Each structure stands twice: as C-alpha cells, then as structure tokens.
Amino acid sequence: MGADIQKLKIPYFDSKTEEILSELEKTQKDFWNLDRESANFLNTLIQINNSKSVLEIGTSNGYSGIWILKALEKTKGKLTTIEFWEKRQSIARKNFEICCPNVPAEAKIGSAIVILEDIKDEIQNKKRNKFDFVFIDANKKEYIEYFKIIDTITTDNAVIVADNILSHYEKTKEYIQELFNNNNYQSQIIDIGAGMMISKKLIQ
Ligand SMILES: C[S@@+](CC[C@H](N)C(=O)[O-])C[C@H]1O[C@@H](n2cnc3c(N)ncnc32)[C@H](O)[C@@H]1O
C-alpha cells in the first residue's frame, strides 16, 4: 500500500527519458543502480538545496546520473561523475546525451581517489570551483578516503549523500562514525533503498 502510494508521486519526465529509465531498471542488479525511489529522493534533495555543482562517485551506466541531471536541469547546474569502468561510462554518456542534452555533464574515467586528488589540485589552483553536492556510490571500503578529500573540495553549505550505508554497514562503518562525530557536519541515515546517509556541512 505504502509503496503504491509512493509510486504515484514519482515525477514524470519526457517519454524518451522514461523509456530509458525503464530499460535501465530491467538490468538494475547487473549495474548496481539505485532503485527508483532512492533516485527520486536524490533528485529532490538536489532541488531542495538548489545545488548547482554536483559530483557523483560511481557512474555505472548513468541511471542515477540521469536523475541528477534532471534536477540540475531545474537548478541550472552541472554534473561531474567518476567511473573506472570505461564501457559503463560510455553507456552513461549516451544516456545523458539522450535524456539531458542541455545539462553539462563531465564524465571522468579512472580510480576515484586518483581523480578526486586531481580535482583537489585543480580547485587549489583555481582552475575549478568547489562542489555543493556530492553523491558517493562507488567502493564502499573507500568511502572514508573519499570523504577526506570531499571535505576539502566542497562549499561551506554542501550536502553529501552516501548510498549502501545499511546494506554495507561493516564496510561503511568508519565513514558513518566519522560523519556522526564530526562537528562540522549534521548527518542522518535514511532507511530508503540500500540506506542513505545525508550529511550537511555546517557553516562555521
Ligand atoms: C553502485 S555502482 C554505481 C551506480 C550508479 N550510481 C547508479 O545508481 O546508477 C558503483 C560503480 O562504481 C564503480 N567503482 C567502484 N569502485 C570504484 C573506484 N574505486 N573508482 C571509480 N569507480 C569505481 C563501479 O565500477 C560501479 O560501476
């Protein structure tokens, strides 16, 4: 009953986007994509925060990326997304092109930590602006390492969302503890999909 009501509230995109999302949902388990409710939640958070510069770690075939881009279409923002599997990201790029041709999407290929360090250098050298929203959905054991870099490349009021917090609690435990014990952040775990942790950077 609850799930049925929720499905009625899912936003409706243009027919081409809905077609692609439905196709991707058929292979959700193979590509480890978000479920539709979690993706809708992510999209909503970006709009609520009026985020304009989103970083995604873990592109896969672009399912969550499409939902992020659809939010950025409204906030007039830009997505940067990281994936080490080239084949997956080329599928994602095609999907972005079809569903959100007018929203800038920068797809970076390589190991997340290496790319995050590169991005950090670019920001320090004023070649790039900080991010105001980060979605973490790659190697669960590395979340804590991602966070240490993310902390330095985000704006004062940034939001960080991490997926698989409940499904991979053992692997993400260090990340969870760090965020709950860090006075610069206010965090809450939400029991949606695989479990998401939402963290808001607090302006000092
Ligand atoms: C859970 S999937 C991402 C799903 C995607 N966010 C979605 O919902 O459509 C995780 C992705 O991260 C990639 N990945 C895992 N570890 C990585 C790393 N260290 N660096 C870059 N990409 C990584 C995997 O290849 C995989 O495609």
Image (spheres, rainbow, N blue to C red):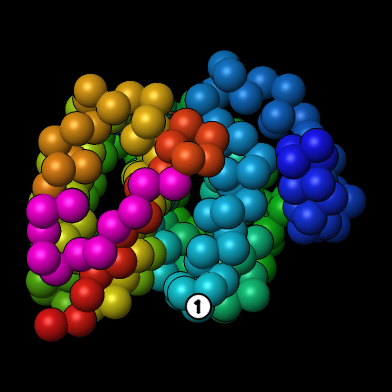
| The residue positioned farthest toward the front in the image shown | 1
Q: Which residue is at the front of the view, 147 or 92?
A: 147
Please tell me whether residue 166 belongs to the stretch shown in magenta: no
User: Which residue: 84% across, 50% down?
Assistant: 8
82 to 49, vertically: above or below: above
Looking at the image, residue 79 sits to the left or right of residue 92; the answer is left
Residue 75, located in which quarter of the rendered image? bottom right
Please indicate, yes or no, whether residue 117 appears anywhere in the rendered image.
no
Q: From the top left corner, tell me how far across and down residue 15 is, in percent.
A: 89, 51
Q: Secondary structure at mark 1?
A: loop
The quarter of the rendered structure image containing the C terminus is bottom left
Q: From the top left corner, tell me how far across and down residue 106 is, in percent.
A: 44, 56
Q: Which residue is mark 1?
A: 50
Residue 57, located in which quarter of the rendered image? top left
The quarter of the rendered structure image containing the N terminus is top right
- Which stretch did the figure color magenta? 179-190
Please indicate, yes or no, whether residue 199 appears anywhere in the rendered image.
yes
Q: Residues within 10 Å of mark 1 (few under 14, many from 20)?
A: some
